[in-house]
Image (tube, rainbow, N blue to C red):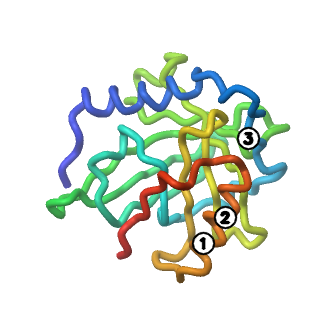
Amino acid sequence: MQMPSLLTRIAGIAALAMAGFAPAVPGDADVPTVPTVDLQRYAGTWYEQARLPNRFQKQCHREVSATYTPQADGSVEVLNRCLRENGTSDSAVGKAEVDDPRQPGLLDVTFMPKGLRWLPFTQAEYRIVALDDDYQWSIVGGKDRKYLWVLTRRQNIDAAQREALVDRARALGYDTTKLQFSRVY
């Protein structure tokens, strides 16, 4: 498995972290998070169906997934995986934490090496903005609406379900005209 260079990871994480400091689009309110999340039920593997383009996933060509594993300290290990265009695997391991128990859908996430995770600019907001009651799909984004991921528990979904999830993201104020649809498995 080919790992991205430390410089590539730092640049990607810095870009994600800086997104948290970007001003909201004028006139738009922050995207609210879901009021409740059971991290034990959220745990497991989610498959990316679509995303807004971003610098830190440019190398991801297909088979994009994220696996969430709750830890004893209350945090969640995040393992992101994808395949590059040439078929080589790419992965990154991070950590997510709920900073405010009153907002369980708002997590601070970092993919920096463990020794650098204490730095404040290495954290980024992971906002669960829509979640299926049965935890079969999730829409994750940023408060400034520059980041968006449509995730499902199944690797492949039908066109009707994909369109329904895109419609939901659009209703939340995300520009879905720029979505990149993930290649199926």
**The one of 31 and 43 positioned closer to us in this rendering:** 31
| Rendering coords of residue 18 (x, y %) | 50, 23
Real-space Cα distance between discs 2 and 1?
6 Å
Callout 3 crowding tier (Cα within 10 Å): few <14, some 14–19, many ≥20: some
Amino acid type of disc 3? Val
Q: Identify which residue is drawn at 36% across, 46% down.
A: 57
**Residue holding disc 2:** 167
Q: Give the secondary structure at mark 2.
A: helix
Determine which quarter of the picture holds residue 101: top right
Q: Is residue 67 left or right of residue 175?
A: left
91, above or below 54, in the image: below
Real-space Cα distance between discs 3 and 2?
15 Å
171, above or below 162, in the image: above
**The one of 150 and 163 positioned closer to us in this rendering:** 163
**Residue holding disc 1:** 163
| CB under 8 Å between discs 2 and 1 | yes
Real-space Cα distance between discs 3 and 1?
20 Å
**Residue holding disc 3:** 31
19, above or below 121, in the image: below
